[in-house]
Amino acid sequence: MALTRADFEDDRLRMQFRANHPEFTVLSEAELEASLESTLAEHPAPGPIWVFGYGSLIWNPMVHYVERRLARLAGFHRRFCIWSKAYRGTPQQPGLVLGLDSGGACRGVAYKLVPELAKQELMLLWRREMVSNAYRARWVKVSTMDGKEGEEVHALAFVVNRSNPGYAGKVPIEKVMSVMTGACGHAGTPAEYLFETVKGLQAHGVRDAYLLEIKKRLAEMGCTPSNAHQSDNPSVKPKISATES
């Protein structure tokens, strides 16, 4: 099931997630608003607000923006390092989603938000990405690779929160493969998430060796974009989810 803007405009997913998973810590609306205000107060430069997407924000950004550019972030790399117990898995059989972890570099997409709508657009992202504290919102410098040649902009990025219980660390690729096809959550399987991310990156001319290796191994197992929505575990029963990237 594809997540839509409406799912976060009415805050339905967060409220249903809290009801379905009382064992999880879920930030309240007031806590989300305070977090957003604190982050906006730390914006390092006057002017427009940019958001850096490296996973699902590439193929399902959801927010209104006035400009989109290919961008490179130094100091962080993209990796399946966050357990997903709702969107792409269950508490009994967690899936994996992408996070920005320290070290290396990452190419993704930078979105310039509509100035007069920036705060409300960011609140949608806070409801999507920040509910379970799996991520930390950070201002980072990204080098845009189209538009104005080589221009650096400050962008908001959702990096992994290593102190969160959902942080998986550096998961061996063999384990990643078993999770790709064995887990399923409210939004589908991790394999679907992988295929959509690869497709989104390739549309911008980006080839991510780590993700392409996982895609290759999935193909060898007979898992393709056409059947990636199916979990090989019939006991998996998707529930309303927490947030992810």
Image (cartoon, grey):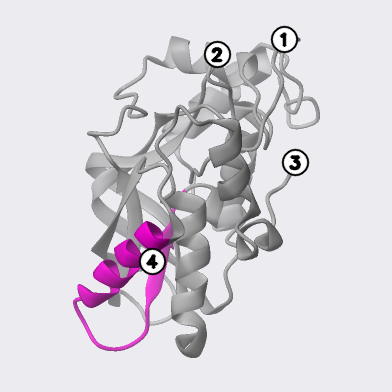
Q: Residues within 10 Å of mark 3 (few under 14, many from 20)?
A: few
Horizontal arrangement in the rendering, residue 45 relative to residue 25 (left or right): left
Amino acid type at mark 2? Gln
- The magenta segment is 30-54
Magenta highlight on residue 42: yes
Q: Secondary structure at mark 1?
A: loop
Where does residue 85 sit, x and y in percent of width and height? 52, 27
Q: CA distance from mark 3 to mark 4?
A: 27 Å
Residue named by callout 4: 33
Q: CA distance from mark 4 to mark 2?
A: 31 Å
Query: What is the quadrant of residue 44 in the picture?
Result: bottom left
Where does residue 197 sit, x and y in percent of width and height? 57, 43
Q: How many marks?
A: 4
Where does residue 117 sit, x and y in percent of width and height? 51, 83
Residue named by callout 1: 235
Q: CA distance from mark 4 to mark 1?
A: 37 Å
At 51% from the left and 79% from the top, the residue drawn is 67
Residue named by callout 3: 1
Q: Earlier in the sequence, mark 3 or mark 4?
A: 3
